[in-house]
Amino acid sequence: MIALMIRDIRLSVRAGGGFGLGLAFFLIVTVLVPFGVGPESAILARIAPGILWVGALLACLLSLDRIFQLDFEDGTLDLLATAPVPMEGAVVVKAFAHWLSTGLPLTLAAPVFATLLSLESPGHYWVFLTLLIGTPALSMIGAFGAALTVGLKRGGLLLSLLVLPLYIPTLIFGAEAATRGVAGLANTTPLLMLAGITAGSVALLPFAASAAIRINLR
Amino acid sequence: MSLWEYANPVKFMALSGKVLPWIIGLTALTLIPGLIWGFFLTPEAENFGTSVKIIYIHVPSAMMAINIWVMMLVTSLIWLVRRHHVSALAAKGAAMVGLVMTVIALFTGAIWGEPMWGTYWAWDPRLTSFLILFLFYLGYMALWQAIENPDTAADLTAVLCIVGSVFALLSRYAVNFWNQGLHQGASLSMDKEENVSDVFYQPLLLCIAGFILLFVAVMLIRTRTEVRTRRLHALETRERMSDG
């Protein structure tokens, strides 16, 4: 399983994968927003946590179809299905590799990009923390969506349509926790809910995702 | 003799063919008088004016939009556990009706909201949940459309329906939380059931019954169409095999 994870990370970093692409997309979204809403720092700081969350979510979406698609096409997924490692484990590992190559860089970059949106200093911390807790859920939910659409020729757009509604609770609690943290309000409840969604997704969705993969491999 | 016998497509077709005209008739008998009663024979409510009449379409369609998703969840589970094709096809047939009901509820709500609240749309928890439900229906139907193999499509949409139900429920609570967080105590949502007096309540019940029957009728028709399409497909395949 560790070998599978290392392989997945290598592939994503080297083969023109989503590694830099997601980050660059995130940067562009962050840069575009001030052009859209105007450069007043009060407005930007007010919407910064939400923008960073939506941007990270969309950047995460970009690389989702890479989780299973290439492996499905070259037959690696068939080998994984017959391997002694259970499919659920393989799904978790692949989602974790996706998080390491997408969610973690986004989380690390978010405090830096927050400066562009004139977020004050405690705000950086909250954006970083909420993304750190929330992005694993994004990867895991995305892996489920990718598993559903893996058999399709052009599943990319459909994947977005399926996954985005599933992202809503994560986005709500994540952005809410960040916004409240920035405003100096109590945000323990949304933080705990966010952590709950992440824990629940990692615990339960691998079963649904591997069921979908088995159906697609049939 | 058990309910499961009707999982056999032939038996299902025979029974639904016999029952369908009756259901259509009953639909007409409840929905048409219900709407006429509601629209023309009830007084105007104070504070609402004539706009209260939208309730006779808005409330039933909103109820159906949610209940149809629950029905799809049940049929999806039956398909995954017992592999009855009629069950999967019923879920597929119901999805379109559910989508239309959601759209009707959203639109009548917007039309009603304009004179009452002064706005067509507000990010009120109920309204937002319905918009999310609409997105779930869209995704579900798009997945049905996208996959060619009917069994694979049935399996994957069933899995999506189950996972989607969990997330839809989660969204409902998340949205409640989110809105309270932003606008302390949203005053827009009204608990309609409590302040509806009998004058409005009786025709409303009739309309709800009518909408349920309408859904059952349309769902049966759509399921029968799906079964026939499947049969036609099988016949065509057989023809091609014997030619080749």
Image (tube, grey):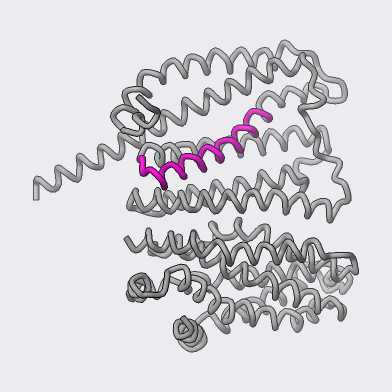
Judged left or right of residue B150, residue A192 is right
Quadrant placement of the N terminus of chain B: top left
Please, what is the dominant secondary structure of the magenta stretch? helix
Percent of width and height locating residue B94: 48, 37
Percent of width and height locating residue A168: 66, 58
Q: Residue at x 66, y 46 (%)?
A: B131
- Residue B44, visible in the rendered structure: yes
In the displayed structure, B2 sits above or below B119; it is above
Residue, far top: B41
Q: Nearer the viewer, residue B236 or B26?
A: B26
How many numbered marks have been drawn onto this rendered protein structure? 0
Judged left or right of residue B197, residue B146 is left
In the displayed structure, B134 sits above or below A200; it is above
Q: Quadrant of residue B119?
A: top right
Percent of width and height locating residue B189: 80, 39
Percent of width and height locating residue A165: 61, 56
In the displayed structure, A186 sits above or below B117; it is below
Q: Nearer the viewer, residue B185 or B173?
A: B173
Q: Residue at x 56, y 52 (%)?
A: B164
- Residue A155, visible in the rendered structure: no
Q: Which region is colored magenta?
A: B59-84
The magenta stretch spans residue B66: yes
Q: Quadrant of residue A102?
A: bottom right
Residue, far left: B243
Q: Residue at x 50, y 53 (%)?
A: B160
The magenta stretch spans residue B235: no
